[in-house]
Image (cartoon, grey):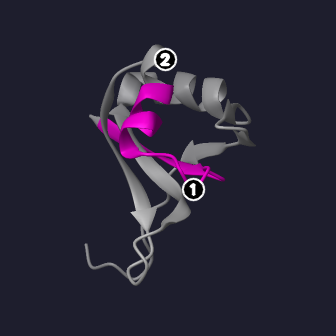
Amino acid sequence: MARTLYVGNLPWSTSETDLADAFRPYGTVISSRIITDKETGRSRGFGFVEVEDADAEKMIEAMNGSDLGGRQVVVNEAKPRQGQAS
């Protein structure tokens, strides 16, 4: 099983590779994505990291409040999107 972690307060310059690399020391990263503005293509300052279920809590504890590119990131388990059909 995999869990998705929300990562907020990212520096604008963070790439998906940078995001995955920051989490790798704490467990298995399946994928990462940076959310961008549809019109400008610029980062919206947050993203998601999909990780192995067994590593999720350890990653949240290690990364929440840590410094990434000069900013203190917020990490928690992603909430399901509202209004989406299941």
> How many residues crowd around disc 2 within 10 Å: few (fewer than 14), some, or many (20 or more)?
some
Q: Quadrant of residue 30?
A: top left
Residue 9 lies, with reference to residue 38, above or below; the image says above
User: Which residue is nearer to you in this view: 69 or 48?
Assistant: 69
Kind of residue indicated by mark 1? Trp
- The vertical placement of 16 against 57, above or below, is below
Residue 12 included in the magenta stretch of the image = yes
| Residue type, mark 2 in image | Tyr
Out of 61 and 85, give the one closest to the viewer: 61
State how far apart marks 2 and 1 are (Cα): 23 Å
- Locate residue 12 relative to residue 3 in the image: left or right: right
The residue identified by callout 2 is: 26
Quarter the C terminus occupies: bottom left
Percent of width and height locating residue 63: 62, 30
Left or right, 34 with respect to 62, comes to left
Question: Residue 60: which disc?
Answer: none
Q: Please tell me which residue is depicted at 72% across the width and 43% down the height of the picture.
A: 71
Q: Residue furthest top?
A: 25
Residue 38 vs 3, above or below: the answer is below
| Total numbered labels placed on residues in the image | 2
How many neighbours does mark 1 have within 10 angstroms: few (below 14), some (14-19), or many (20 or more)?
A: some
Considering the image in quadrants, where does the N terminus appear? top left
Label annotation for residue 12: 1
Instruction: Answer left or right for 44 relative to 55.
Output: right
Residues in magenta, as a range:
2-22
